[in-house]
């Protein structure tokens, strides 16, 4: 590639980067404006902070925040692998289903299903 071609390519890259920078600046401005509006909403709500407002809205609308992973419930409790669960995984898998299909059907994570199918829980 000649020097002239390289310069032309650099100019094109600079123009592309300038457009991208402008889009990002516009997104940041919109985000800041939205944050100002939300801050005003929380301030005018009568609640101490956004967390209290969210909790009140969740209760009002019958939402279980602990299932949403955000403001309410803390860590999920970890299920115990039992011999019965292992056997259930292996039984479903014997039908020719993939580990992914078994995990979706039983509601068990893919890594746990895969480990059970590979014999990782045979000691139970």
Image (tube, helix red, strand yellow):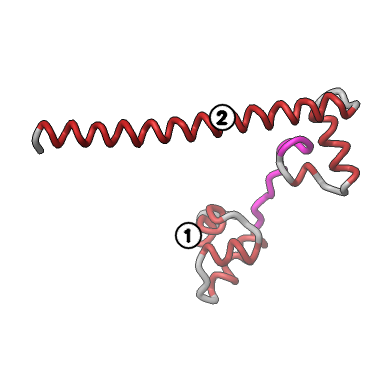
Residue range in magenta is 70-82
Nearest the viewer among 70 and 56 is 56
Q: Earlier in the sequence, mark 2 or mark 1?
A: 2
Q: Name the residue under label 2.
A: 28
Label 2 environment density (alpha carbons within 10 Å; few <14, some 14–19, many ≥20): few
Please give the name of the residue rendered at 41% of the width and 35% of the height, measured from the top-left corner.
19
Estimate the x, y position of residue 97 in percent, counting from the top left: 52, 71
Q: Contact (CB < 8 A) between labels 2 and 1?
A: no
**Where does the N terminus fall, quadrant-wise?**
top left
Label 1 environment density (alpha carbons within 10 Å; few <14, some 14–19, many ≥20): few
Q: In this view, does 95 lie above or below 48?
A: below
Estimate the x, y position of residue 66 in percent, counting from the top left: 77, 42
Residue 121, quarter of the rendered image: bottom right
Instruction: Count how many numbered circles sit on residues in the image.
Output: 2
Classified by dominant secondary structure, the portion drawn in magenta counts as loop
Assess whether residue 64 is covered by the magenta stretch. no
* For residue 68, side relative to residue 117 (left or right): right
Estimate the x, y position of residue 59 in percent, counting from the top left: 89, 42
Q: Is residue 79 above or below residue 43?
A: below
Please give the name of the residue rendered at 56% of the width and 67% of the height, measured from the top-left corner.
101
The reply to whether residue 122 is visible in this rendering is no
What distance separates the C-alpha of mark 2 from that of mark 1?
48 Å
Q: Mark 1 points at which residue?
A: 118
């Amino acid at each position: 590639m000649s020097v002239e071609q390289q310069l032309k390519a650099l100019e094109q890259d600079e123009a592309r980067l300038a457009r991208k920078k402008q889009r990002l600046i516009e997104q940041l401005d919109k985000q800041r404006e939205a944050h100002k509006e939300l801050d005003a909403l929380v301030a005018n709500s009568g609640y101490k902070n956004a967390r209290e407002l969210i909790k009140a809205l969740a209760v009002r609308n019958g939402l279980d925040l602990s299932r949403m992973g955000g403001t309410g419930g803390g860590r999920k409790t970890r299920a115990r692998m039992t011999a019965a669960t292992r056997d259930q995984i292996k039984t479903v898998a014997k039908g020719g289903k993939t580990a992914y299909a078994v995990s979706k059907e039983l509601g068990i994570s893919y890594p746990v299903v895969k480990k059970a199918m590979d014999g990782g829980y045979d000691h139970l």
